[in-house]
Amino acid sequence: IDSNVTFSPDGKEFAFLRGYPLQGETAVMVANADGTSERKLAPGKLAFGPFGNPAWSPNGKVIAYPAEITDANGNFMTLSEVQVADGSEKPISSQRWWRIGRLAWLRDGSGLVFTARESVASPSQIWYLAYPGGEAHRITNDLNNYLAMSLTADSSVLVTVQSEQVSNVWIAPNDDARRASQVTHTKFDGVEGISWTPDGKIVYASGTSGNLDLWLIEANGTGQKQLTANAGNNSRPSVSDDGRYVVFMSDRTGTNHIWRIDIDGSNATELTNGGGELNPQCLPTGQSVLYGITSGKGGIGKVAIGGGENEQIIYKNALGVAISPDGKWIASAYFQPTDVKTAIYPIEGGEPQRILDLSGYNYIRWTPDGRALAYVDQKDLSNINSQLIDGGPSKQLTNFKSDLIFSFAWSRDGKQLALARGTLNKDVVLISNFKDQQ
């Protein structure tokens, strides 16, 4: 079961979503309340990430669910419905979202409220969708994330969890993270990516401007410069080995693609134009860029940093791309029928050479010596651990006693560690008259 369950109005059946990674499919499933007579009601394209949740209508006739669709402009999600009686399905709205989360029907069936992100870098907001007309508008409009959500029995009040993320960039000696010093002092810095330049500066994504933009700063916190502006959301920067370029993902055209700018922010150039690409990484040679592919069944692609033909080198669903310091290996998510692990691929692509028992949903980077993968362990306190490629127990690399780590990157010489650290504050919020908020 890959989603929350939703019960029929009479309580005799429940529905849920199930992913079939090997088939590239997500299906709406229905079963009796005791778990018997499970059946597939509506198959669809595998969602590239969390599946969201279905919602059974008050009249019991349809189930609304987040559906992933691909068209000429790339991958997107919309709300669809499936008829319980015969399994026929159709979109409810023409609106495009990057991700859709929780759904809830109004008591009279006249609409739905739900959480959704308009782009990969946008916050999760609460929306209202009229049914069956399909007109959609935001209920919330801020930089916070809204997570769990529910309605009172009469649908007059909405209750949700508001999540406020505060993050800044910190720098620490690689051998003593306790000596970390804060470099930025705003609110949403580094969460969506950090990358070092060869001469020891830092490029990072920040939400200071209201959108996600790229900034450049000295390691001592001086010389801050904005690199992108007024061009959608820009994140996941990767600086080329020669320090001339920054590659990144941007939704400035409406779909996420890989872009390149000069290190001073000039000469923006689109490198990919497929169905949706994300999380680029420059090869140490400085000549090529690898990136994740969200269209089709997913995978990893390659393009010359100067532009040109896009080549797919891995045809398995992948989330992120982490390239070893010697440029010989790729670490990425590896989807299996029951879970997601981490695979090691040769830099040329093809089949994985090794599967590690490490969640593929982790933010992963190679350690400077290339012998292990580093990831953030959030089980107790938030710290960076490493897992040797050749096996063995994990090793804790940092020893922070407070705050959360959202992303990190080592300097080119491996002597310094940049981290996005901060807090995640959650509050329960009540919203009334939400249908009137536009």
Image: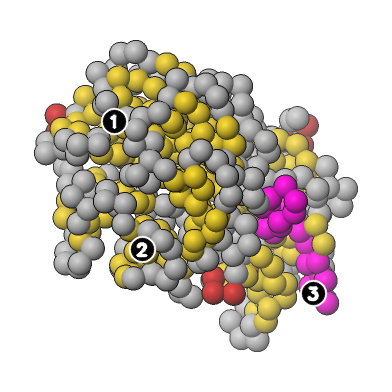
Instruction: Specify the amino acid type for callout 2.
Output: Pro
Identify the residue under disc 1.
198
Query: What whole-number distance in Å separates the C-alpha atoms at marks 1 and 3?
Result: 56 Å
Query: What whole-number distance in Å separates the C-alpha atoms at marks 3 and 2?
Result: 43 Å
Instruction: Specify the amino acid type for callout 3.
Output: Gly
Horizontal side of 220 relative to 248 (left or right) equals left
Identify the residue under disc 2.
346
Horizontal side of 394 relative to 156 (left or right) equals left
Identify the residue under disc 3.
87
Please rate how many residues cluster around mark 1, counting C-alpha atoms within 10 Å: few if below 14, some from 14 to 19, many from 20. some
Seen at 78% across and 62% down, the residue is 81
Residue 427 screen position, x and y as percent: 47, 36
Residue 278 screen position, x and y as percent: 52, 46
Quarter holding the N terminus is bottom right
Residue 81 against residue 364 in the figure, above or below: below
Helix, strand or loop for disc 1? loop
User: Marks 2 and 1: in contact by CB < 8 Å?
Assistant: no
Which stretch appears magenta? 67-89
Seen at 61% across and 30% down, the residue is 232
- Which label's residue is closer to the chain start, 1 or 2? 1
Quarter holding the C terminus is top right
